[in-house]
């Protein structure tokens, strides 16, 4: 059969679309764009000592994709950073326009014995600035090393409990839950998780990350 050309053919194609719709046929929906997820953290989330593919950010992105919620990770994790350091660079990292943020800081503050009041002030300012931009936050807590004594340790973690109770914040009490203190899950330094440790961290925090993404969708 010869091909049809001209106005008649064009009109035939135009009128065919409503017919297809009436028959219940629909074009495939466009795939949702990955959520821009900023990880604001230190060496624990930067994947210190590990190949990039085994680090927290890569493992988290893979886990979110497997759960049907793809994310585009914006890397705001800097090894050695403190809460003060992250606050100082916050405006710069927010330049990427994140839609949601994981805040996982405090490990280096604890190692340096920084006053809990300073840790709280820095993180409160970070959370205030994110709230001003209506960016949903997953806030991960941290414990101080035991060698600093129980009084400092209690005062340190209470900071995270207090900030985690803020409205609009999803609180994950301890970033290293299930990993800290287990030599089989740590690198030789006894501080940073190995690849197996990272997998456990991601598996434990993933439900709260998915809650964070759900908050974004409802917004």
Image (cartoon, rainbow, N blue to C red):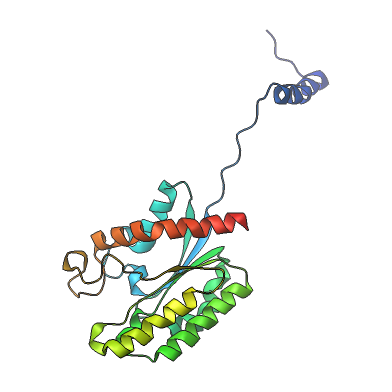
Q: Is residue 88 left or right of residue 141?
A: right
Q: Residue furthest right?
A: 7
Q: Dividing the image into 4 quarters, which one contains the N terminus? A: top right
Number of marks present in the image shown: 0
Is residue 112 visible to the viewer in this orientation of the structure? no
- Residue for point 34% across, 84% down: 154
- Residue for point 44% across, 60% down: 208
Instruction: Tell me residue 163's x, y (percent).
Output: 48, 78
Q: Quadrant of residue 56?
A: bottom left
Instruction: Tell me residue 90's x, y (percent).
Output: 52, 78
Is residue 74 visible to the viewer in this orientation of the structure? yes
- Residue for point 43% across, 78% down: 160
Q: Is residue 48 left or right of residue 8?
A: left
Q: Is residue 211 left or right of residue 17?
A: left
Q: Residue furthest top?
A: 1
Instruction: Tell me residue 209's x, y (percent).
Output: 45, 59
């Amino acid at each position: 059969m010869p091909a049809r050309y001209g106005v008649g053919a064009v009109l035939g194609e135009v009128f065919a679309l409503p017919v297809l719709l009436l028959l219940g046929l629909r074009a495939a929906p466009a795939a949702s764009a990955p959520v821009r997820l900023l990880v604001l953290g230190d060496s624990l989330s930067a994947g210190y000592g590990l190949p990039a593919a085994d680090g927290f950010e890569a493992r988290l992105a893979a886990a979110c994709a497997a759960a049907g919620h793809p994310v585009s990770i914006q890397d705001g994790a800097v090894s050695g950073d403190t809460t003060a350091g992250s606050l100082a660079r916050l405006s710069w990292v927010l330049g990427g326009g994140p839609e949601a943020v994981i805040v996982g800081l405090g490990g280096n503050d604890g190692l340096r014995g920084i006053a809990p009041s300073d840790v709280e002030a820095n993180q409160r300012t970070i959370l205030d600035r994110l709230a001003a931009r209506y960016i949903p936050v997953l806030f991960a807590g941290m414990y101080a090393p035991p060698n600093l004594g129980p009084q400092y340790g209690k005062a340190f973690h209470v900071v995270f409990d207090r900030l985690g109770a803020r409205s609009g914040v999803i609180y994950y009490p301890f970033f290293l839950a299930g990993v800290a203190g287990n030599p089989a899950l740590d690198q030789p330094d006894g501080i940073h998780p190995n690849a197996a440790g990272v997998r456990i961290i991601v598996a434990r925090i993933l439900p709260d990350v998915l809650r964070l993404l759900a908050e974004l969708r409802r917004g």
